[in-house]
Amino acid sequence: MRKKTFWLSSAFLTASLLFSSHAGGAESFFDVGDDHWAYEEVAHLLAEDVIEAENEGSTAFAVNDNITRAEAAVFLYRALDVEPDDEEDHHSFTDLAEADFGYEEVQSLVRADVFDRADAFHPEDELTRAEMARIFASAFQLTKESTVPFRDVFQDDWFYPYVQSLLHEGVTSGDGNGAFLPDDSLTKAEFAVFLTRLTDDDFKVDGQKQVTDAWEDKTASLADELNEAVVDGVAQAEEDHRDRDFADVESEILKGATASFSDRIVEPFFYDYACWGCDFFMLDMNGQLFDFDAEILDDGDVLIETKRLANHLLSGAHLEIVLTYDDGDWKIDTFDSTLPTSKRGFDLSKQDMIDIIEDSYFVDGDEIADIEFRESEAREPVESVEHEQMIQADHYYFDVTLEGGGVFDVVIDSFHGLVSAH
C-alpha cells in the first residue's frame, strides 16, 4: 500500500508529524536554537530525512510537548526500514480508524511486533518512558541487558528488561540521580534524542557509568547521614550530662538503614564505640574511592563493591555494601570492610594510578596539565601487624604539572593505593 504523508498547515505545526526530506539544521524550527540541549539530535533527524520543517523559521518542533503514542509510532516508523502495512493483515483497534492519523504506521509496527495486538491502541495517550523502552527494545531488537540498576526500576517490573537494554546500549543515562522515571511522560525533544542515539552510535552516552556514579553518591550520602546521626546522638547526650540512649537517634537511623542493620551494627556501635571527637566513623567511606561498581542481585538488592584507597589516617580497604529497597527508599543492609591481603591487594596498573591522580585531593581547584610516569621501585616485603601478613607495596613515581604552574612529586603504592604528594 502507498505510504501517506500527513501535512498540517499551521505555522505552529508540530514537527514530529511531518516527514519528508530536508537538508537544513535544527534552527529550521523557531523553538530549537543552537543553544538547545537537543539541537544536535533534532538536526540529525532533519538531515536523515526523518522530520521536516514545512516552513523554515516559522515551524515549531514543540520540544516541551509530551509525545503521544500515535506520534511516537509515526516518528519511529519513518526512522525504521519497515515494510508498508498490508491491508490483508490489519489489526482492528477499537480506537484507531483507517482515516485516523498514524493508522498505517501503527499497523506496520504491529506487524513488526513493535506494538501488541491489543483491543485498543490509545493513540492520544501520552507515551511514558517505560513504554518508550518497550517499543525501542522491540523495534531495534535489543536483547543485552545492563546489570547496573536504576534506583526506581526493579526486576519484577514488566519494563525492567527493556530499560536495562537501553542502558546497556548507551541510549539512556536516567535523570542524573540514578533514576529512570518510568511513569513519566516523554517530551518530543527527549524522544528525538533517544531515537537518534539508537540510530547513530556517535550520539550514544555512557549511561552505565553515569548511573554507577549516582549509586556512589547515594551510598556515600547514606553512610555520611548514618555517621552524623550517631555522632550527634552521642554529642547531645554528653551535652545534657546523661547516658546515651539509642532511642534518641533510632528514627533518624532508620531513614538510611534497614531495621536489621540498625540492630546488628548501628546500635552496638552507638553504645560501645561511638565518639563525637574521634577520627574514625562507623561506616568509613571517607577518602578516595576507586573502581566503584553497582550490580543488581537475584533478590533485587544492589551490591556495591569498591576500594577505599589508603590515606594517612586510614588503611586501604575493600568495601562491600548491600542496599535494600525498604519503605520507599534504598537503605544500607550490610557494610563490610576488608583490609587488602596478599591475595586481594589492589594491584593497581599505571593507568589506574593516573586515574587516581586525576581525582586526588591535591588538584582540587586546578586542572592537571600533564602527568608523567618517572620510575617504579620494587620494595622488600615487610610484615604488617595490621594486615597480619607480609605485604609488598611497590612504589610508583609521577611528575604532575598543574595548569596553574604547580608541580608535584607524587608517589603511589600499588598495594593499597596510598597517594603522597610533595
Image: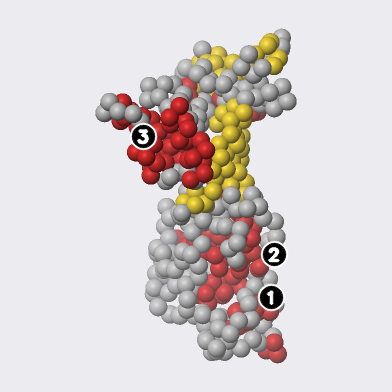
Question: At x 43% / y 64%, what residue is drawn?
Answer: 63
Q: Nearer the viewer, mark 1 or mark 3?
A: 3
Question: Which amino acid, mark 2?
Answer: Gln
**Is residue 337 depicted above or below 190 in this figure?**
above
Question: Which amino acid, mark 1?
Answer: Ala
Residue ranking furthest to the left:
240
Residue ranking furthest to the front:
243
Residue 112: give its label. Answer: 1
| Disc 1/disc 3 C-alpha distance (Å) | 64 Å
Question: Which amino acid, mark 3?
Answer: Asp
**Is residue 55 depicted above or below 343 in this figure?**
below
Image x and y of residue 105, in percent: 60, 79
Question: At x 57% / y 21%, what residue is drawn?
Answer: 315
| Disc 1/disc 2 C-alpha distance (Å) | 11 Å
Observer able to see residue 157: yes
**Is residue 72 depicted above or below 163 in this figure?**
below
Image x and y of residue 266, in percent: 47, 36
Question: At x 43% / y 74%, what residue is drawn?
Answer: 13
Question: At x 55% / y 14%, what residue is drawn?
Answer: 409
Q: Which residue is mark 3?
A: 245
